[in-house]
Image (tube, rainbow, N blue to C red):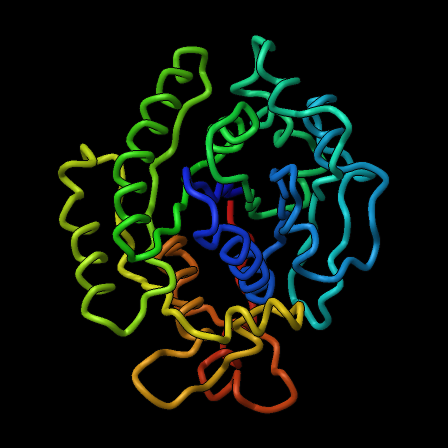
Amino acid sequence: MIKIAIVSTKGGVGKTTLAANLGALLADMGLRVLLIDADEKPSLSKFFPIRRRAVHGLAYVVTKGMVTADGISVIDLPHLPGTLDIVISDSPEINLSDWLYNRIDQAVRLKMALRSPDVVDNYDCVIMDSHGGAGAIEDAVALAADFLISPVRPDVLSGSEFMDGTLKMLERLESSTAIGAGLGPMKAVINCLRRSNNSRMVADTIRQNFILMQGKVTVLDTVIPNANAYQAAATEQIPVHRYDRHRSGATPCAYDVMHQLAWELIPSLNGVYAGHVYGDEEASDRGGGEEEGASHVG
Protein backbone atom coordinates (compact mmCIF):
# COMPACT_ATOMS: atom_id res chain seq x y z
CA MET A 1 0.00 0.00 0.00
CA ILE A 2 1.25 3.45 -0.95
CA LYS A 3 0.49 6.44 1.29
CA ILE A 4 0.76 9.94 -0.21
CA ALA A 5 0.41 13.27 1.59
CA ILE A 6 -0.36 16.48 -0.31
CA VAL A 7 1.24 19.26 1.72
CA SER A 8 2.27 22.89 1.53
CA THR A 9 3.07 25.71 3.89
CA LYS A 10 1.00 28.01 1.69
CA GLY A 11 -2.71 27.89 1.00
CA GLY A 12 -4.30 28.19 -2.43
CA VAL A 13 -1.65 26.25 -4.35
CA GLY A 14 -3.99 23.49 -5.55
CA LYS A 15 -3.53 20.74 -2.96
CA THR A 16 -7.17 19.63 -2.89
CA THR A 17 -7.56 19.67 -6.67
CA LEU A 18 -4.41 17.59 -7.02
CA ALA A 19 -5.46 15.09 -4.32
CA ALA A 20 -8.92 14.60 -5.84
CA ASN A 21 -7.80 14.27 -9.45
CA LEU A 22 -4.86 12.00 -8.68
CA GLY A 23 -7.03 9.75 -6.54
CA ALA A 24 -9.75 9.54 -9.19
CA LEU A 25 -7.24 8.75 -11.94
CA LEU A 26 -5.65 5.94 -9.91
CA ALA A 27 -9.11 4.49 -9.22
CA ASP A 28 -9.84 4.71 -12.96
CA MET A 29 -6.64 2.76 -13.52
CA GLY A 30 -8.02 -0.02 -11.35
CA LEU A 31 -6.49 0.78 -7.96
CA ARG A 32 -8.40 0.77 -4.70
CA VAL A 33 -7.97 4.32 -3.42
CA LEU A 34 -8.84 5.89 -0.08
CA LEU A 35 -8.86 9.68 0.17
CA ILE A 36 -8.49 11.32 3.59
CA ASP A 37 -9.61 14.90 4.05
CA ALA A 38 -7.41 16.10 6.89
CA ASP A 39 -8.31 19.75 6.41
CA GLU A 40 -10.64 20.83 9.20
CA LYS A 41 -12.17 23.28 6.73
CA PRO A 42 -13.26 20.53 4.33
CA SER A 43 -12.79 20.88 0.60
CA LEU A 44 -11.84 17.39 -0.53
CA SER A 45 -14.98 16.06 1.20
CA LYS A 46 -17.06 18.19 -1.17
CA PHE A 47 -15.04 17.74 -4.36
CA PHE A 48 -16.95 14.69 -5.65
CA PRO A 49 -20.54 13.64 -4.89
CA ILE A 50 -20.94 11.19 -2.02
CA ARG A 51 -23.08 8.12 -2.62
CA ARG A 52 -22.99 6.83 0.95
CA ARG A 53 -21.91 9.02 3.84
CA ALA A 54 -20.35 7.20 6.76
CA VAL A 55 -21.34 7.71 10.38
CA HIS A 56 -17.84 8.86 11.33
CA GLY A 57 -15.03 10.81 9.72
CA LEU A 58 -11.67 12.41 10.46
CA ALA A 59 -12.46 13.23 14.10
CA TYR A 60 -13.11 9.55 14.90
CA VAL A 61 -9.96 8.43 13.08
CA VAL A 62 -7.76 10.83 15.03
CA THR A 63 -9.33 10.53 18.48
CA LYS A 64 -9.81 6.74 18.33
CA GLY A 65 -6.58 6.07 16.51
CA MET A 66 -8.09 3.73 13.92
CA VAL A 67 -9.93 3.64 10.62
CA THR A 68 -13.03 1.47 10.56
CA ALA A 69 -15.65 0.73 7.91
CA ASP A 70 -18.17 3.05 9.55
CA GLY A 71 -15.75 5.94 9.04
CA ILE A 72 -15.33 5.46 5.29
CA SER A 73 -17.71 7.21 2.89
CA VAL A 74 -18.27 6.07 -0.70
CA ILE A 75 -17.75 8.52 -3.56
CA ASP A 76 -20.32 8.50 -6.35
CA LEU A 77 -18.37 8.24 -9.62
CA PRO A 78 -19.76 5.81 -12.21
CA HIS A 79 -17.83 3.14 -14.10
CA LEU A 80 -14.74 3.01 -11.92
CA PRO A 81 -12.75 -0.19 -12.45
CA GLY A 82 -11.17 0.43 -9.05
CA THR A 83 -12.40 1.95 -5.77
CA LEU A 84 -12.60 5.57 -4.65
CA ASP A 85 -13.64 6.10 -1.02
CA ILE A 86 -13.03 8.91 1.45
CA VAL A 87 -12.68 9.66 5.14
CA ILE A 88 -14.47 12.99 5.28
CA SER A 89 -13.54 15.98 7.39
CA ASP A 90 -16.54 16.18 9.69
CA SER A 91 -15.80 19.59 11.24
CA PRO A 92 -15.77 18.41 14.85
CA GLU A 93 -16.39 20.71 17.77
CA ILE A 94 -12.89 20.00 19.00
CA ASN A 95 -9.82 21.37 17.25
CA LEU A 96 -7.91 18.26 16.21
CA SER A 97 -4.53 20.02 16.13
CA ASP A 98 -5.10 21.20 19.69
CA TRP A 99 -6.29 17.72 20.70
CA LEU A 100 -3.14 16.15 19.25
CA TYR A 101 -0.73 18.78 20.55
CA ASN A 102 -0.26 17.42 24.07
CA ARG A 103 -0.30 13.74 23.12
CA ILE A 104 2.97 11.84 23.23
CA ASP A 105 1.93 9.89 20.12
CA GLN A 106 0.88 12.94 18.09
CA ALA A 107 3.47 12.34 15.38
CA VAL A 108 2.49 8.72 14.74
CA ARG A 109 -1.24 8.87 15.57
CA LEU A 110 -2.44 8.89 11.97
CA LYS A 111 0.32 6.60 10.77
CA MET A 112 -0.80 3.93 13.21
CA ALA A 113 -4.47 4.46 12.32
CA LEU A 114 -3.68 3.67 8.69
CA ARG A 115 -2.47 0.24 9.77
CA SER A 116 -6.05 -0.69 10.63
CA PRO A 117 -7.24 -3.85 8.83
CA ASP A 118 -10.05 -1.95 7.09
CA VAL A 119 -7.37 0.09 5.33
CA VAL A 120 -4.58 -2.43 4.81
CA ASP A 121 -6.88 -5.17 3.49
CA ASN A 122 -9.02 -2.99 1.21
CA TYR A 123 -6.84 -0.30 -0.39
CA ASP A 124 -3.78 -0.02 -2.59
CA CYS A 125 -3.26 3.70 -2.15
CA VAL A 126 -4.12 6.33 0.47
CA ILE A 127 -4.02 10.00 -0.51
CA MET A 128 -4.22 12.58 2.27
CA ASP A 129 -5.10 16.24 1.78
CA SER A 130 -4.07 18.77 4.42
CA HIS A 131 -4.55 22.38 5.39
CA GLY A 132 -1.84 24.78 4.27
CA GLY A 133 0.38 25.88 7.14
CA ALA A 134 1.69 24.29 10.32
CA GLY A 135 -0.11 22.34 13.01
CA ALA A 136 -0.18 18.97 14.73
CA ILE A 137 -2.69 17.50 12.29
CA GLU A 138 -0.65 18.68 9.28
CA ASP A 139 2.48 17.13 10.81
CA ALA A 140 0.66 13.86 11.48
CA VAL A 141 -0.45 13.71 7.84
CA ALA A 142 3.07 14.29 6.52
CA LEU A 143 4.60 11.73 8.86
CA ALA A 144 2.00 9.09 7.93
CA ALA A 145 3.01 9.16 4.25
CA ASP A 146 5.55 7.19 2.24
CA PHE A 147 6.22 10.36 0.28
CA LEU A 148 4.97 13.93 0.14
CA ILE A 149 3.80 15.99 -2.84
CA SER A 150 3.93 19.76 -2.64
CA PRO A 151 2.28 21.79 -5.43
CA VAL A 152 4.12 25.03 -6.22
CA ARG A 153 2.68 27.88 -8.26
CA PRO A 154 5.31 29.46 -10.50
CA ASP A 155 5.05 33.02 -9.22
CA VAL A 156 7.64 34.92 -7.20
CA LEU A 157 5.74 34.93 -3.90
CA SER A 158 4.81 31.25 -4.08
CA GLY A 159 8.32 30.29 -5.12
CA SER A 160 9.87 32.20 -2.22
CA GLU A 161 7.41 30.73 0.28
CA PHE A 162 8.13 27.26 -1.04
CA MET A 163 11.87 27.68 -0.62
CA ASP A 164 11.67 29.18 2.86
CA GLY A 165 8.59 27.52 4.29
CA THR A 166 9.32 24.05 2.97
CA LEU A 167 12.79 23.89 4.48
CA LYS A 168 11.42 24.99 7.86
CA MET A 169 8.64 22.41 7.62
CA LEU A 170 11.05 19.61 6.77
CA GLU A 171 13.36 20.58 9.62
CA ARG A 172 10.43 20.56 12.05
CA LEU A 173 9.17 17.20 10.81
CA GLU A 174 12.61 15.62 10.93
CA SER A 175 12.74 16.39 14.64
CA SER A 176 9.83 13.98 15.05
CA THR A 177 11.73 11.04 13.57
CA ALA A 178 13.41 10.39 16.90
CA ILE A 179 10.21 8.75 18.16
CA GLY A 180 9.94 6.55 15.09
CA ALA A 181 7.60 8.57 12.90
CA GLY A 182 9.90 8.72 9.89
CA LEU A 183 9.68 11.23 7.06
CA GLY A 184 9.38 10.26 3.42
CA PRO A 185 10.89 12.21 0.52
CA MET A 186 9.16 15.30 -0.85
CA LYS A 187 8.31 15.72 -4.53
CA ALA A 188 7.43 19.22 -5.73
CA VAL A 189 5.18 19.66 -8.75
CA ILE A 190 4.94 22.92 -10.68
CA ASN A 191 1.23 23.71 -10.74
CA CYS A 192 -0.75 26.19 -12.84
CA LEU A 193 2.13 27.04 -15.16
CA ARG A 194 1.18 29.93 -17.42
CA ARG A 195 2.55 30.30 -20.91
CA SER A 196 4.68 33.29 -19.97
CA ASN A 197 8.38 33.95 -19.62
CA ASN A 198 7.95 34.98 -15.97
CA SER A 199 6.25 31.72 -15.02
CA ARG A 200 8.88 29.67 -16.81
CA MET A 201 11.64 31.66 -15.12
CA VAL A 202 10.23 31.03 -11.63
CA ALA A 203 9.73 27.33 -12.42
CA ASP A 204 13.34 27.08 -13.62
CA THR A 205 14.55 28.85 -10.46
CA ILE A 206 12.75 26.35 -8.26
CA ARG A 207 14.40 23.49 -10.15
CA GLN A 208 17.85 25.10 -10.01
CA ASN A 209 17.58 25.63 -6.26
CA PHE A 210 17.44 21.89 -5.63
CA ILE A 211 20.96 22.05 -4.15
CA LEU A 212 19.87 24.82 -1.76
CA MET A 213 17.06 22.51 -0.64
CA GLN A 214 19.81 20.22 0.66
CA GLY A 215 18.70 17.37 -1.55
CA LYS A 216 15.48 17.00 0.46
CA VAL A 217 13.11 17.90 -2.38
CA THR A 218 12.85 16.52 -5.91
CA VAL A 219 11.10 18.64 -8.54
CA LEU A 220 8.99 16.43 -10.80
CA ASP A 221 9.38 16.59 -14.56
CA THR A 222 5.60 16.65 -15.00
CA VAL A 223 4.19 20.18 -15.02
CA ILE A 224 0.50 20.95 -14.54
CA PRO A 225 -0.50 23.82 -16.84
CA ASN A 226 -2.76 26.71 -15.98
CA ALA A 227 -5.87 25.54 -17.84
CA ASN A 228 -9.55 26.29 -17.31
CA ALA A 229 -10.33 22.58 -17.49
CA TYR A 230 -9.19 21.95 -13.92
CA GLN A 231 -11.61 24.48 -12.45
CA ALA A 232 -14.39 23.51 -14.85
CA ALA A 233 -14.06 19.83 -13.95
CA ALA A 234 -14.21 20.69 -10.25
CA THR A 235 -17.39 22.69 -10.84
CA GLU A 236 -18.89 19.66 -12.61
CA GLN A 237 -17.64 17.40 -9.78
CA ILE A 238 -15.89 15.04 -12.16
CA PRO A 239 -12.21 14.08 -12.51
CA VAL A 240 -10.30 16.33 -14.85
CA HIS A 241 -8.93 13.42 -16.88
CA ARG A 242 -12.52 12.55 -17.80
CA TYR A 243 -13.42 16.17 -18.53
CA ASP A 244 -10.45 17.23 -20.67
CA ARG A 245 -9.40 14.34 -22.92
CA HIS A 246 -8.30 16.12 -26.10
CA ARG A 247 -6.96 19.55 -26.91
CA SER A 248 -5.38 21.25 -29.87
CA GLY A 249 -2.56 23.70 -29.33
CA ALA A 250 0.55 23.82 -27.19
CA THR A 251 -1.05 23.11 -23.80
CA PRO A 252 -1.46 19.36 -23.17
CA CYS A 253 -4.86 18.02 -22.18
CA ALA A 254 -5.48 17.01 -18.57
CA TYR A 255 -5.86 13.34 -19.56
CA ASP A 256 -2.23 13.28 -20.71
CA VAL A 257 -0.88 15.46 -17.89
CA MET A 258 -2.48 13.41 -15.12
CA HIS A 259 -1.30 10.14 -16.61
CA GLN A 260 2.26 11.47 -16.86
CA LEU A 261 2.07 12.57 -13.23
CA ALA A 262 0.79 9.19 -12.05
CA TRP A 263 3.50 7.35 -13.98
CA GLU A 264 6.23 9.58 -12.59
CA LEU A 265 5.01 9.18 -9.02
CA ILE A 266 4.40 5.41 -9.27
CA PRO A 267 6.67 4.00 -11.98
CA SER A 268 5.08 0.53 -11.74
CA LEU A 269 1.97 2.06 -13.37
CA ASN A 270 3.87 3.27 -16.42
CA GLY A 271 1.81 2.51 -19.54
CA VAL A 272 -1.39 1.81 -17.62
CA TYR A 273 -4.28 4.02 -18.71
CA ALA A 274 -7.61 4.90 -17.17
CA GLY A 275 -9.60 1.92 -18.32
CA HIS A 276 -13.11 3.26 -18.82
CA VAL A 277 -14.34 4.35 -22.26
CA TYR A 278 -16.33 7.53 -21.68
CA GLY A 279 -19.04 7.08 -24.27
CA ASP A 280 -16.67 6.44 -27.19
CA GLU A 281 -13.62 4.45 -28.23
CA GLU A 282 -11.02 6.98 -27.17
CA ALA A 283 -9.44 4.91 -24.41
CA SER A 284 -8.60 2.08 -26.78
CA ASP A 285 -7.13 4.60 -29.24
CA ARG A 286 -4.72 5.72 -26.49
CA GLY A 287 -3.77 2.19 -25.54
CA GLY A 288 -6.16 1.86 -22.63
CA GLY A 289 -7.87 -1.10 -24.25
CA GLU A 290 -4.73 -3.18 -23.83
CA GLU A 291 -4.36 -2.50 -20.10
CA GLU A 292 -7.67 -1.65 -18.53
CA GLY A 293 -6.47 -1.56 -14.96
CA ALA A 294 -3.48 -1.83 -12.75
CA SER A 295 -2.61 -4.78 -10.64
CA HIS A 296 -2.78 -3.99 -6.94
CA VAL A 297 0.13 -1.94 -5.72
CA GLY A 298 1.85 -3.27 -2.64
Q: Position of residue 143 (x, y in %)?
A: 47, 28
The image quarter containing residue 210 is: top left
Q: Is residue 161 left or right of residue 10?
A: left
The image quarter containing residue 95 is: top right
Image height of 70 relative to 143, above or below: below
Quarter of the image for the N terminus: give it.
top right
The image quarter containing residue 39 is: top right
Q: Is residue 244 left or right of residue 110?
A: left
User: Which residue is pictured at 31% across the width and 42% down the height?
Assistant: 162
Q: Residue furthest front?
A: 157
Count the marks. 0
Q: Position of residue 46 (x, y in %)?
A: 70, 55
User: Which residue is pictured at 32% across the width and 49% down the height?
Assistant: 158
Q: Position of residue 117 (x, y in %)?
A: 70, 33
Image height of 13 relative to 254, above or below: above
User: Which residue is pictured at 44% across the width and 36% down the height?
Assistant: 146
User: Which residue is pictured at 32% across the width and 66% down the height?
Assistant: 193
Image height of 137 relative to 54, above or below: above
- Which one is in front, 45 or 52? 45
Image height of 276 relative to 52, above or below: below
Q: Is residue 287 left or right of residue 197?
A: right
